[in-house]
Image (spheres, rainbow, N blue to C red):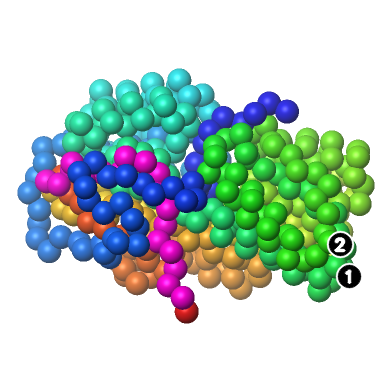
């Protein structure tokens, strides 16, 4: 199949993270996430930077979760009287760079971006930093503020949930189809490894009969790939991957008359259709969701703060939230429906998106020079 170009949330899926990578900093500031203090917001009004009152979101695809992030950014920008601009590259690395350069020519105070081609992206990101722009990278560098997530844990949780289900409901035996994104970046191979390790906890009766790299992140890709997989493996019981692709697989199974309520389908990201399926019950048992709209709202607010000369976090940790019931989906959607109210309550916001480190336009020479890991959770 055609390899997928490098992309973001997933991972996502959107958000990706290179496990074991100890990110660098430009000026000797802490590079170990465990050494970062909680974010300390400014107490005063800040000193204006003279940067344009405009925030930008450079997306790579019209995936639902990226659209949600953009909607949150726009809502935040509107609330602060800033302009919001966006563009989608369609997974074209050259176009992605051209769009970011166009934002810089237009004039922006903050640039949020989803990575696509590390070598090409880094040049324009460094240019943005040199201009004093708050460069907000989703697991990418150089960046002023970096969004990170533990991809191994996300993958392991997804695989373990499937293994537990097979053990409890399928007699410990099931054939598995996994949609991986290994060609997108080394980071997503970390999630892949976590999924396989999680599945192994269920014993030898769980067999991964198809481990496929998808051509693109879309429901149509998932649909086509599932159709092909059914030609060789008609008795698949477990389907795992990102929500967008697994929703397509769900549709293919239904169209082929092969969908059964005792199957275990699970995705990552929290796509709306996936959450509808979890809420309805049946084969789609789990979505590990990220608070994309809340994330976007925070990026927009922090971009506005940066322009105003206020402090912003160095790191946003995106937690994956396991949604496996109608009540869990309902709570998640309630939080996402009003990002302004959640952002105003730091404890509520950090339940999904902890904030670490502190930087501002005045200390802008402190920035990440490579992707970083999230902090290691403290033993409970």
Q: Residue at x 19, y 31 (%)?
A: 131
Q: Is residue 169 left or right of residue 134?
A: right
Give the mark nearest the N terminus, 1 or 2.
1
Q: Which mark is residue 205?
A: 2
Can residue 148 be seen here? The reply is: no
For the residues bearing labels 1 and 2, Cβ distance under 8 angstroms: yes
Figure check: 2 above or below 110 = above
Q: Give residue 81's position: percent from left, percent from top.
A: 22, 46
Q: Which mark is residue 171?
A: 1
Say which of 54 and 7 sits in front.
7
Q: Which residues are magenta?
A: 362-379
Q: Give residue 187's position: percent from left, percent from top.
A: 53, 44
Q: CA distance from mark 1 to mark 2?
A: 9 Å
Say which of 78 and 308 sits in front.
308
Q: Is residue 239 left or right of residue 96?
A: right
Figure check: 379 above or below 48 = below
Q: Give residue 178's position: percent from left, percent from top.
A: 73, 48
Say which quarter of the image contains residue 371: top left
Give the prevailing secondary structure in the magenta stretch.
loop
Q: Quadrant of the N terminus?
A: top right
């Amino acid at each position: 199949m055609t390899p997928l170009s490098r992309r973001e949330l997933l991972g996502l899926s959107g958000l990706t993270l290179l496990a074991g990578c100890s990110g660098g900093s430009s000026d000797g500031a802490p590079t170990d996430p465990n050494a970062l203090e909680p974010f300390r917001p400014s107490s005063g009004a800040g000193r204006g930077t003279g940067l344009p009152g405009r925030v930008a979101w450079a997306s790579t695809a019209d995936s639902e979760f990226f659209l949600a992030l953009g909607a949150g950014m726009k809502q935040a920008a509107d609330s602060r009287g800033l302009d919001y601009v966006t563009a989608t590259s369609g997974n074209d690395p050259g176009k992605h760079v051209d769009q970011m350069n166009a934002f810089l020519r237009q004039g922006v105070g903050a640039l949020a971006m989803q990575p696509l081609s590390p070598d090409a992206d880094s040049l324009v990101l460094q240019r943005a930093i040199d201009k004093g722009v708050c460069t907000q990278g989703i697991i990418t560098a150089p960046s002023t503020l970096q969004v990170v997530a533990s991809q191994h844990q996300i993958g392991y949780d997804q695989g373990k949930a499937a293994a537990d289900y097979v053990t409890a409901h399928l007699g410990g035996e099931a054939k598995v189809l996994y949609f991986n994104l290994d060609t997108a970046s080394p980071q997503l191979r970390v999630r892949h490894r976590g999924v396989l390790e999680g599945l192994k906890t269920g014993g030898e009766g769980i067999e991964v009969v198809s481990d496929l790299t998808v051509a693109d992140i879309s429901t149509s890709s998932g649909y086509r790939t599932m159709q092909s997989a059914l030609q060789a493996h008609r008795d698949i019981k477990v389907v795992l991957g990102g929500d967008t692709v697994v929703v397509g697989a769900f549709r293919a199974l239904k169209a082929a008359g092969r969908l059964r309520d005792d199957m275990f389908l699970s995705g990552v990201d929290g796509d709306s259709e996936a959450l509808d399926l979890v809420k309805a019950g049946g084969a789609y048992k789990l979505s590990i969701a990220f608070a994309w709209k809340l994330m976007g709202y925070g990026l927009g607010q922090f971009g506005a703060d940066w322009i105003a000369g206020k402090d912003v976090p160095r790191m946003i940790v995106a937690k994956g939230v396991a949604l496996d019931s109608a009540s869990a989906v309902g709570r998640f959607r309630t939080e996402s429906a009003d990002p302004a109210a959640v952002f105003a309550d730091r404890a509520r916001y950090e339940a999904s998106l902890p904030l670490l480190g502190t930087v501002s336009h005045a200390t802008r020479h402190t920035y990440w020079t490579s992707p970083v890991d999230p902090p290691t959770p403290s033993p409970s």
